[in-house]
Amino acid sequence: MSSDTLEARTPALQTKLPAVGTTIFTVMSALATEKGAVNLGQGFPDFDCDPRLVQSVTDAMAKGLNQYPPMAGIPQLRAAVAGKIEAMYGHSYDPADEVTITAGATQAIITAVLAIVRPGDEVIVLEPCYDSYVPNIELAGGTVVRVPLSPHTFRPDFAKIEAAITPRTRAILVNSPHNPSATVWTAGEMRQLEELLAPTDIFVISDEVYEHMVYDGQEHQSAARFPGLAARAFIVSSFGKTYHVTGWKVGYVAAPRPLTTEFRKVHQFNVFTVNTPVQHGLATYMADPQPYLQLPTFYQRKRDLFREGLKNTRFSILPSEGSYFQCVDIAKVSDLPEEDFCKWLTSEIGVAAIPLSAFYGNGFDQRVVRFCFAKKDETLKTALDRLAKL
Ligand SMILES: Cc1ncc(COP(=O)(O)O)c(C=O)c1O
């Protein structure tokens, strides 16, 4: 039979992720573009990174550092990461077998999940949560156990977390500084988690991508600071967030040796490794700690500019302790549900925001929306002028 006589047939596909569709981020960004709105929805800077960082990467390429690097990342970058963690959080990771360079935090998280979660395992997520966590757990065959953070304050409720733990609980995903609420876990809260997990075999995946954006003189409470957490944690961070290069998609995972061993088995066969010149560029650039040490000052000024302007609106301003997000309560401004309000705000007022309901599995609506202030001052001012008309 020749192929002309065969019916070309695409096999029927049963989706593994029936709940996943177009995300609200895509919808709001498309609407923002269509309406010419200022996009304070999606979380990325509209300004460029330090030219010295671009130069470092360019130099690496020009030097011919363009072939496969070691699977776990180049030793210089792993050493720089371990050195930073030790200096900031006082925990020593061996760069040889406890630090792995990843294709951003997103790949780090799914790799950690795939390394530890088996069908039937339960994994606790604290809602509202970053949108990749739930599909990652589902792809691993795990069962998602959703525990809400306290409405409006977004503090962890340890009684609820404790009640959600069963003999099948394999892991808990935590995220501080938190997207979307901009809360930062206190040392006391981290200790409570440490105590709660102490008698268990539960792993922690600690998403710390905003670790260098903590304000008002507070310190980031990395899981690395707490021995009982560090011993069971995959600590995830993102150079994209820290160095204003979200499009480069490079991050890392620090975890004790046995955890890293399993992590790397999965990493080796999903990305194998991460692009070489960017790793060299980052390693060179990281020799100077100032860019990340100055990040709180840099972003706190933007946060304060934005919050000051929001005082001229009828929004109720929620705390922003860390990350580059600012949430507001819309109750005094509108009766619309969060998502409709965000669409209306984008179309009619010309400012895009993200409804917090998008970060809950059941679409819980508490009349709160999220703005991103990682924007040029003029972008923020244009947005504030428009919001003041509300
Ligand atoms: C909480 C959180 N985790 C992970 C990520 C993903 O980071 P990356 O771009 O390095 O994959 C983001 C990005 O928005 C985030 O907000």
Image (cartoon, rainbow, N blue to C red):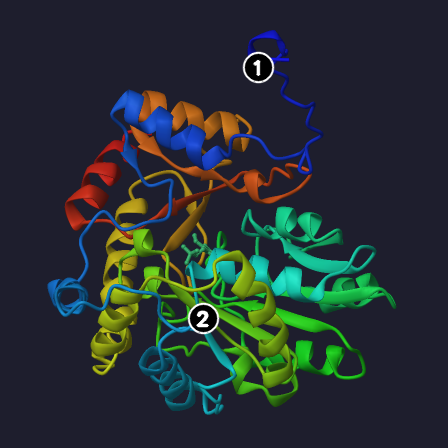
In what quadrant of the picture does the C terminus appear? top left
Which residue matches tag 1?
A: 3
Q: Quadrant of residue 5?
A: top right
Gap between marks 2 and 1 measured at Cα: 42 Å
Residue at image location 44% in from the left, 37% down from the top: 25
Q: Is residue 310 above or below residue 21?
A: below
Q: Which residue is mark 2?
A: 71
In the depicted structure, whether residue 32 falls above or below residue 382: above
Q: Residues within 10 Å of mark 2 (few under 14, many from 20)?
A: some
Q: Quick check: which quadrant has ligand 1? A: bottom left
Quadrant position of the N terminus in the picture: top right
Residue at image point 23% right, 45% down:
380
**Type of amino acid at the residue the image marks with label 1:** Ser
Pointer 2 or 1: first along the chain: 1
The one nearer the camera, 10 or 81, is 10
- The residue at the point 25 percent across, 57 percent down is 302
User: Is 334 above or below relative to 60?
Assistant: above
Where is residue 278? Give x, y as percent.
Answer: 27, 64
Name the residue at 80% across, 55% down.
119
Q: Residue furthest right?
A: 167
- Which residue is more in the foreground, 119 or 3? 3
Graded by Cα atoms within 10 Å as few (under 14), some (14 to 19) or many (20 or more), the crowding at tag 1 reads: few
Relative horizontal placement of residue 154, taking residue 327 as reference (left or right): right
Image location of residue 149, percent across then percent down: 64, 57
Camera-side mark, 2 or 1 = 1
Q: Relative to 333, does residue 295 appear above or below in the rendering?
A: below
